[in-house]
Amino acid sequence: MPSRDGAISRALTFFDNGSFESLLGRLVAFPSTSQEAEAGPALTRYLEEGLRPWISSMGFEVQVHPNPKPGFGPILTASRVEDPTRPTVLIYGHGDTVRGLDDQWAPGLKPWELKAEPDRWYGRGTADNKGQHALNLAALEAVLAERGGKLGFNVKLCIETAEERGSTGLREFVAGNKDLLAADVLIASDGPRVEPDLPTITTGTRGTWHCDLAIRLRPGGVHSGHWGGLTRDPAVLLAHALTTIMDRNGKILVRDWLPPAFPPAVRELLKGCPVGGGGEAATVDEGWGEPGLTSAEKIYGWQSFIVLAMVSGRPENPVNAVAPEARAHCQIRYTVDADTARFEPALRAHLDAHGYDFVKIENAYIRMPASRTDPGNPWVGWTRASMEKSLGKRVQVIPNSSGGLPGDVFVDHLGVPLVWIPHSYSGCKQHGPDEHLLKTTAREGITAFTGIWWDLGESGVPAKG
């Protein structure tokens, strides 16, 4: 008789006998970076050659659509409807990656070639996001096989190829294809767990607001010997301006950026939530950030300010000159509790009040809006129970992940609750060289999703919206 345990056994056999590794190697081999124009054809090939045949073999009707925004990667949709009275789940993923950074990987590692280590698979996209959506689809295939070609529920897919460029075009596409993508819930995977060995559900993501801070004093540089000590240095002025925005311990000083109080419901949810797993890539520096908050509260419930890049003169080839200008590209990571309309005017007022009216705020924009489904939503509790049954361990629920994803698009246009289940960890180096996926975490991921897909075909599923 078909059974839940049988489905999980099928998925784990696929994972343990090398079949998943072979699949992941084929997907990683597509150099599908969306950040290099010459790689554009690889984005289409990833969808047409890497995913379409596999997804079609599971009984999906598959389409690959051009992006509504010219110059950005295509979008794959797929639909498998068995019974309209049963729940419909939407699975999201992205097949594009950041740049390969080929010359920066450790000896013996290449971005577009899967390399297996005892507990790691190295390669661009293993963690972000090819490996994550491949695990979920492989779990779906195991349930189909165990139930003799049936799922007991309906599935729709949306795989984009412009996520690493801010998911440009996705909002317009989803808005124009509401019927094609209509679902009761989004259940998908991206980003990191709170710790590598602690299964995690996140119900949203932080948003990102960007701006440039610029000081321009003169048409060109002037001799540092003749003018040094007499004329203003824009780099020094900009550095001082930044210290009025954030103190030396990481506390944001533009207090109008922040919510009036830390949300009590978020604080309760994050009690005892750990943060870790950065490996050699990063550390949790005690005392950095907002005073009085735990590490989990700082990244899952509060704002952060980061200087992403800063330049004055020509660092690669310095000359003896006082530079004419200085510029910093800055970012705020924010939650849904923040009022983004206040970010730029509050910063302008703050700089002016501190005597930095000559610092210009330019190119201010939201790259990805924040999103959050109520963690008390029935789909969240149902998914948590399913995962804990499959894994035999506690699952941590957080209100939103620390990074950004386009969940807001699906909330705004489809009205679906968000259930993100990450299969990676914060030290996976997904935006740098040596990106990798942990095998133990991935194995738990395919186990959890096989259980979820099986349980969706049973009774006791949350009511359709």
Image (cartoon, rainbow, N blue to C red):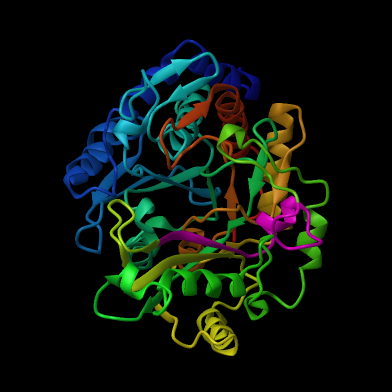
Query: Where is residue 452 shown, x and y percent of the image?
Result: 61, 36
Q: Residue at x 70, y 57 (%)?
A: 298
Q: Residue at x 54, y 75 (%)?
A: 241
Expressed as whole percent of the image width and height from the top left, the position of residue 116 reads: 44, 16
| Residue ID at (57%, 30%) | 450
* Residue 364, above or below 449: below
In this picture, which residue range is highlighted in magenta? 287-310
Q: Quadrant of the C terminus?
A: bottom right
Write down the quadrant of residue 464 in the picture. bottom right
Please say whether residue 425 is visible from this viewpoint. yes
Whether residue 368 is visible to the viewer of this picture, yes or no, is: no
**Viewer-side residue, 218 vs 181:** 218
Q: Is residue 71 left or right of residue 252?
A: left
Residue that lies at the very extreme toward the top in this rendered image: 17
- Nearest the viewer among 422 and 62 is 422
Q: Is residue 344 left or right of residue 326?
A: right
Q: In terms of depth relative to the viewer, which is nearer, 459 or 156? A: 156
Going by the image, does 422 lie left or right of 302? left
Tell me if residue 285 comes above or below residue 198 in the rendering. Answer: below
Residue 323 located left or right of residue 213:
left
Q: Quadrant of residue 67?
A: bottom left
Depth check, front residue: 371 or 1: 371
Residue 401 at x, y = what percent?
Answer: 61, 52
Question: Compared to 64, does 227 lie above or below?
Answer: below
Q: Give how far across and how far down residue 150 sits, in percent.
A: 48, 31
Residue 299 painted magenta: yes
89 in the magenta segment: no
